[in-house]
């Protein structure tokens, strides 16, 4: 059952343009599922840099971490995912079906559950682009290209901008 649900999640992600643009996935670790009950938490940590893909000799470099919320936020108290950065802490407790993707180098934790159950799927992504800053630049550039495409901007300028995006992608891709 978990494998089927994991495959369903991966199939949905393959069709999600925002996820593809932001993560530029090369490999995705099979989704795992967790349930946190009252009193449970996961302390501050950084995800391991390499994971073995179950049932195979393949390894995956963990550039990005992902949490897919499976329980509605009102069904449990506490359980926020807190991601720390040099700019402070960001707390996430989203609706069922919402996904948060963040750098695997980020310190993060899951706050204690005070009431109810927190259900989530977690997995890791090896991006085509290892460097967070470069991946962020490509994401911004891709978003700009998409916005300009919708406004019907000068076609020649759009082709030139798209060529720069793909040139950077080629230069920075690691496969």
Image (spheres, rainbow, N blue to C red):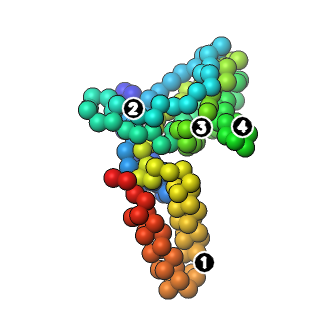
The label number, if any, that marks residue 106 in the structure image: 3
Dot 2 or dot 4, earlier in sequence? 2
Q: CA distance from mark 3 to mark 2?
A: 16 Å
Q: CA distance from mark 2 to mark 1?
A: 42 Å
Write down the residue under mark 1.
151
Is the Cβ of the residue at disc 1 closer than 8 Å to that at disc 3?
A: no
Compared to residue 114, the image places residue 164 above or below, namely: below
Query: Where is 128 relative to 31, above or below?
Result: below
Q: How many circles with numbers are drawn on the protein?
A: 4
Q: Position of residue 141 (x, y in %)?
A: 55, 66
Q: Which mark is residue 68?
A: none
**Camera sees residue 46:** yes
Mark 4 vs mark 1: which is more N-terminal?
4
Residue tagged 4 = 89
Q: CA distance from mark 4 to mark 1?
A: 36 Å
How many residues crowd around disc 4 within 10 Å: few (fewer than 14), some, or many (20 or more)? few
Instruction: Indicate which disc residue 51 carries.
Output: 2
In this view of the protein, which residue sits in the foreground, 101 or 4?
Answer: 101
Image-based side of 50 in relation to 90, left or right: left
């Amino acid at each position: 059952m978990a494998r089927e649900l994991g495959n369903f999640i991966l199939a949905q992600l393959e069709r999600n343009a925002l996820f593809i643009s932001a993560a530029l996935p090369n490999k995705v670790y099979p989704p795992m599922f967790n349930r946190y009950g009252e009193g449970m938490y996961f302390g501050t940590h950084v995800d391991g840099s390499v994971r073995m893909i179950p049932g195979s000799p393949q390894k995956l470099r963990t550039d990005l971490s992902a949490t897919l919320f499976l329980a509605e936020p009102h069904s449990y108290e506490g359980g926020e995912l807190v991601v720390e950065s040099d700019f402070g802490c960001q707390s996430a407790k989203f609706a069922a079906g919402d996904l948060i993707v963040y750098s695997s180098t980020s310190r993060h934790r899951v706050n204690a559950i005070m009431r109810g159950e927190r259900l989530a799927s977690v997995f890791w992504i090896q991006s085509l682009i290892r460097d967070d800053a470069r991946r962020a630049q490509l994401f911004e550039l891709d978003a700009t290209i998409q916005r300009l495409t919708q406004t019907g901007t000068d076609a020649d300028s759009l082709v030139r901008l798209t060529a720069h995006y793909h040139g950077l992608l080629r230069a920075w891709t690691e496969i």
